[in-house]
Amino acid sequence: MSAMRRFWKRSARAPALPLRRTISYCTTCMGRRAHLETTLPANLAVLARHSDRVELVLLDYGSRDGLGAWVRERFVAELESGVLRYARTDEPTAFHPAHAKNVAFRLARGDVVFNLDADNFVGDDTCTRLDALFAAAPRRFAVSSAQPDVGGRLAFCREDFAALGGWDERYQGWSIADFDLCERAREGLGLAQVDFVSGSALLHDDAERVRHMPQWTAASDDDERALAALPEDRRAFAAKLLARDPQLFRSYVHNRGLLQERRAAGRIRAHEPGAYGRARLVDQHGRPVQFS
């Protein structure tokens, strides 16, 4: 029996659990095995309480730190049961968050899709709270509060995410892409944005945050000119980014320009159906993985 059929057969058994919807937690990783060694076992332990209704999709985005071998050896039972699904692509040379998350979300099979960064922990109550949130009013999406390092937690009904065409893959590096997705969800689909607080994260420095992302080169005076060109109400925030790490600042400037272009064009859908999150994938055994 295929993994997909096992997943939905388990879901259809209506186990004695409070969950009414199937939930896919989607984690992308390039060079973050050290983080996953802490977060992944803990997250799978939480999800095991609802194993008939949840899955964790782990996308290995071209990691070179032995991530695949570690997952294959450490999580035999979880991979066999389908609560953990592993896929790898060897195409990327740098971490492209928007593309990576699109790939993971396209692999997801749940009614609800949830972005869970590699340094994030699922809360003990995350599954039940997500289930209640979307069962009560499906025309909504969830966004994490401004807690340290959990700003990327977003949850959508899978059909709504597909209708938006995913994250816009023109965005590179850090910042803006999530904001753009949420703005399109509110204005384009009329979805209500709901604050969602659950779980925690490993804290780490900015060097770790940008280590595998595309690198922009610029002289310091170029950065100062770019800062001066920003609207006055964004300059103070951007200056803090520049002081923290030039790569954070440069990705912010690049992505903010794309946001302005998108707004001017009035574009709601980032990509046409099936035109986002394209990748050649293999599973933990090296067998090709197809999108559902």
Image (cartoon, grey):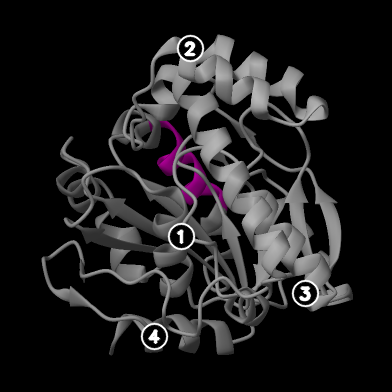
Of 141 and 34, the residue lying toward us: 141
3 or 1: tag closer to the N-terminus: 1
3 or 4: tag closer to the N-terminus: 3
Taking 116 as reference, is 11 above or below it? Answer: below
* Residue holding disc 1: 169
Give the CA separation, mark 3 to mark 2. 39 Å
Give the CA separation, mark 4 to mark 1. 21 Å
Amino acid type of the residue tagged 3 in the rendering? Gly
Give the CA separation, mark 4 to mark 2. 49 Å
Quarter containing the N terminus: bottom left
Which of labels 4 and 2 is toward the front? 2
Which of labels 4 and 1 is toward the front? 1
Specify few, some or many for label 2: CA neighbours under 10 Å numbering under 14, 14-19, or 20 or more: few
Amino acid type of the residue tagged 2 in the rendering? Asp
Label for residue 292?
Answer: 4
Q: Where is residue 84 drawn, in percent x and y?
A: 38, 61
- Seen in the image, is 292 located left or right of residue 266? left
4 or 2: tag closer to the N-terminus: 2
Q: Are marks 2 and 1 in contact (CB under 8 Å)?
A: no
4 or 1: tag closer to the N-terminus: 1
* Residue holding disc 2: 221
Give the CA separation, mark 3 to mark 4. 25 Å
- Seen in the image, is 179 located left or right of residue 158? right
Residue 111, quarter of picture: bottom right
Give the CA separation, mark 3 to mark 1. 18 Å
2 or 1: tag closer to the N-terminus: 1
* Residue holding disc 3: 188
Q: Where is residue 163 drawn, in percent x and y?
A: 63, 81
Taking 93 as reference, is 201 above or below it? Answer: above
Amino acid type of the residue tagged 4 in the rendering? Ser
Span highlighted in magenta in the image: 38-46
Amino acid type of the residue tagged 1 in the rendering? Glu
